[in-house]
Image: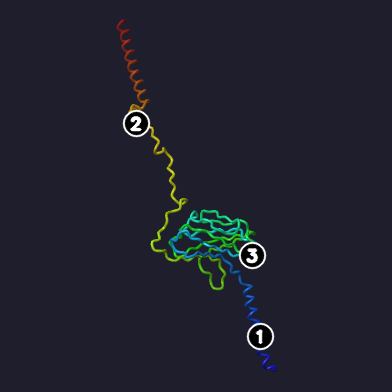
Amino acid sequence: MSRFTAPHTARRLSAITVLALAASVALAAPASAHVEVEAKDARALAENVALNFTAETESDKARIAKLEVILPEGIAPADVTYKEGPTGWKLEATDRGYIVGGPQVAVGKDAAYAVTVRQLPDAKSLAFKTLQTYSDGRVDRWIELEEPAEGEHGSPAPMLELKPAAPGAKPASPSPAAEPSTTEPAGPAASEPTDKQSATPAEAATADKEDDGSSPVLIAALVVVVLALIGGGLWWFRRRGDANTA
């Protein structure tokens, strides 16, 4: 009877050993939480698309406080509007994307929210790099674009795969906030007359003469010279008359 008991016991010990090793590996491995993005029938150049994000928590002590998203090329911050999310959360545009946040979610709970994008760009996939901030100041950076190596956890950015654009789909015009500025450069307005436009014909003629070089200073100098010549001539004639009288 002992001949059958030994192999059976050995098999049982082997099974227990395998389970123990698997459990130890699972406990030693880092958490596999990450941020995901999904959209219904996501296509290139699709308009008014709802993107659903889920930020899983990696902390059993701190709460998720906010999420900052760096938008991919082709989507401007002004093209994104907030749809729904945790109670009290709001969206604030940044120069490179947006931030969603508000009252901190409960410890151990994921943060899920949705935004609407005016139009998706003409691309095959989109990466929404995300910075996940916790109440204790911890920041998880989900920004890696390459797949992590086998056995590594990594911090992949949320990726959205796009189907080809629908027939006839075209890029929409830029959003109002993205349009070039129409502010006129400094200087007289087009409707305001310049000095010559507002001057009378006589004043304009005088101005033209001044532009030719006949400045008031030159005229005054010529008058002074003429008066000096006249005065010198009178003095010469008077002195000559006095000489003849003597």
Disc 1 marks a residue whose amino acid type is Arg
Q: Nearer the viewer, residue 219 or 226?
A: 219
Q: Are marks 2 and 3 in contact (CB under 8 Å)?
A: no
Kindly identify which residue carries mark 3: 108
Q: CA distance from mark 2 to mark 1?
A: 111 Å
Which of the two discs, 1 and 3, sits closer to the camera? 3
As drawn, 132 above or below 210: below
For label 1, count other residues whose C-alpha is less than 10 Å away and answer few (under 14), some (14-19) or many (20+): few
Question: x and y percent of residue 226 in the render?
Answer: 33, 19
Q: Residue furthest top?
A: 246
Disc sitting over residue 12 in the figure:
1
Give the SS element for disc 3: loop
Q: Residue at x 58, y 61 (%)?
A: 132
Q: CA distance from mark 1 to mark 3?
A: 37 Å
Disc sitting over residue 211 in the figure:
2
Give the SS element for disc 1: helix
Q: Residue at x 39, y 63 (%)?
A: 167
